[in-house]
Image (cartoon, helix red, strand yellow):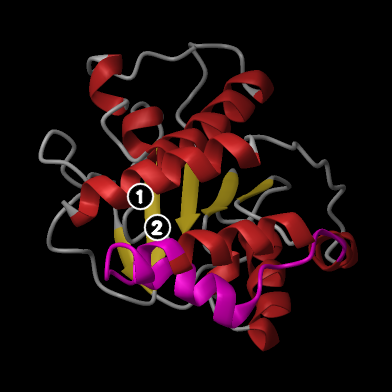
Amino acid sequence: MRDTQIDPDTLLSLPFDHYQRYSLTRRIIDYLWPDEARPPLRILDVGGQNSSLKYFLPDDEIISADPLPPLAFAHTDKLPFKDDGYVVASGAALPFADRSFDVVCAHDTLEHVPEELRGDFLAEMARVARGLAILNGPVYTPRTAELEKRIALFSERALDWENEYLKEHIEQGLPAADSIRKSLDSAGLTTVSVPNGSLVMWLTMMALRHYLIAL
């Protein structure tokens, strides 16, 4: 594992699901590039408005791209936003040349993209990548959709608080794994699915997190 150059406990102060996504991306990259003396990779994080990827891969060049400008505040004061470049751009029309990045990734992003633009979003990820794209986020299953609605109702009815991210998940609909695979296959990429996370644990942690936020 590469040195994060900060206390690992500080990274654990990130939201648990955010930490899980970025930690998995680091593990994939460390597996594919195990030589710690390798040259820095050029990595694009699409939808990276609140990205923490630079803290997980500090020795690599991290560029964030998002339709919105950087947020005014980070998840925690201990981890202010940090990258090597920020570009305001739609993931469905990236302003980069073909094969510009060693790795192109997106974390918890595709489910916030309107369904009619998801194919373009995936095609653009594949276009600007030199062969590796990491798409890291929830996909549709009946159980996942049911539990997201349950947490949304819990926050609205019990806590009088609306989670705007879950609201978008429900309104847009979670992307289907088959449609993601077909889009990436048509772009010439071989796809590998890496299931991760526990729905029961997610439900428990989200309920606790929402309650603490409401307090």
In the rendered picture of this protein, how many numbered marks are placed on residues? 2
Q: Which mark is residue 48?
A: 2
- Quarter of the figure with residue 55: top left
Residue at 61% x, 38% y: name it: 200
Chief secondary structure of the magenta portion: helix
Q: Which mark is residue 51?
A: 1
| Residue 8 visible in the displayed image | yes
Proximity of marks 1 and 2: CB atoms separated by less than 8 Å: yes
Please name the amino acid that badge 1 sits on: Ser
Decide which of 71, 31 is in the foreground and name it. 71
Please name the amino acid that badge 2 sits on: Gly
Q: Is residue 115 above or below residue 13?
A: below
Task: Give how far across and how far down residue 168 sits, in percent.
Answer: 49, 76
Q: Which residues are magenta?
A: 154-178
Task: Give how far across and how far down residue 63 sits, in percent.
Answer: 38, 52
Task: Give how far across and how far down residue 88 sits, in percent.
Answer: 33, 74
- Quarter of the figure with residue 193: top right
